[in-house]
Each structure stands twice: as structure tokens, then as C-alpha cells.
Image (tube, rainbow, N blue to C red):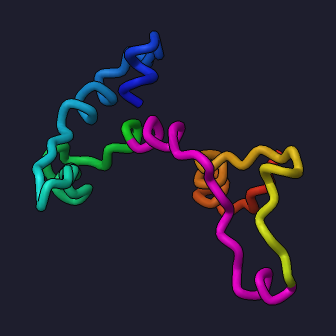
Amino acid sequence: MSEWIRNNGSLPKSADLLEELAAFSYTYKRDKMQVIDKEELRATLGRSPDQADALALTFAWPVSVRLTAMQLLRGQSNHYHRSGLAYDPIERHECEKRGERYVPK
């Protein structure tokens, strides 16, 4: 994400997003960077960092659909990237919140 921003990536003007991104902190544990725990971040903000989560998800590639045990037993596999269907994790989340079935477009 930082490379995208340095290369003229544009973020929306959102006070909530700015607050969420500014609330992130990190430490080093055995020479590895460890980002603040999400529960700690929620406590700091007093709410869930939904906009920061959504921004981070835009850079989560490749994303694959989780298959059920029955789908695996039937020999189904995850070929959205080959089929031309676009899997959108945010749209899937919104559909699930509404109680609807997500169908990639």
C-alpha cells in the first residue's frame, strides 16, 4: 500500500479513515514487525477500523473463495481467476450481512 501511495495513489478525504490509519502502531518481536492487535485498535478507537480494513483488502491479492468440505469432496476447485469472474471480498461481506448469497460477477 505504501508503494501505491508513493506512486500517486489517492485516498478519500475521510476523517474516520485518517483516524484509523493514524491509530496503527507496531513493535518488533524477534526481528519481525508486529502490527497492533485488532482488539487493541478497537479499544483505542472505540470502534472497529472498518475503513482501514476495507483499504487493506483492496491490496489483498490473490483472494480465493473458501470452499466447503462438500465442494472439495465433489472435486470443485477455486477457478474464479481463470473463469473471468471477479471475486469481490467486500461485496461478499456486504451480501452476507444482508443475508444474501454472494455470486461473483
70 over 50 or under it: above or below: below
- What is the quadrant of the N terminus in the image? top left
Q: Residue at x 59, y 54 (%)?
A: 93
Residue nearest the viewer, comparing 59 with 92: 59
Could you say where residue 85 lies in the image, as x and y percent from the top left? 83, 47
| Res 13 → quadrant | top left
99 relative position to 29: left or right: right
Residue depicted at 45% across the width and 35% down the height: 55
Q: Is residue 50 magenta?
A: no
On the picture, is 66 further left or further right than 38? right
Taking 29 as reference, is 89 above or below it?
A: above
The quadrant where residue 95 appears: bottom right
Image vertical order of residue 65 relative to residue 85, above or below: below
Give the image location of residue 52, x and y in percent. 37, 38
Q: How many marks?
A: 0
| Magenta stretch bounds | 53-74
The C terminus is located in which quarter? top right
Q: Position of residue 45 (x, y in %)?
A: 19, 43
Residue 14: percent from the left, percent from the top? 36, 21
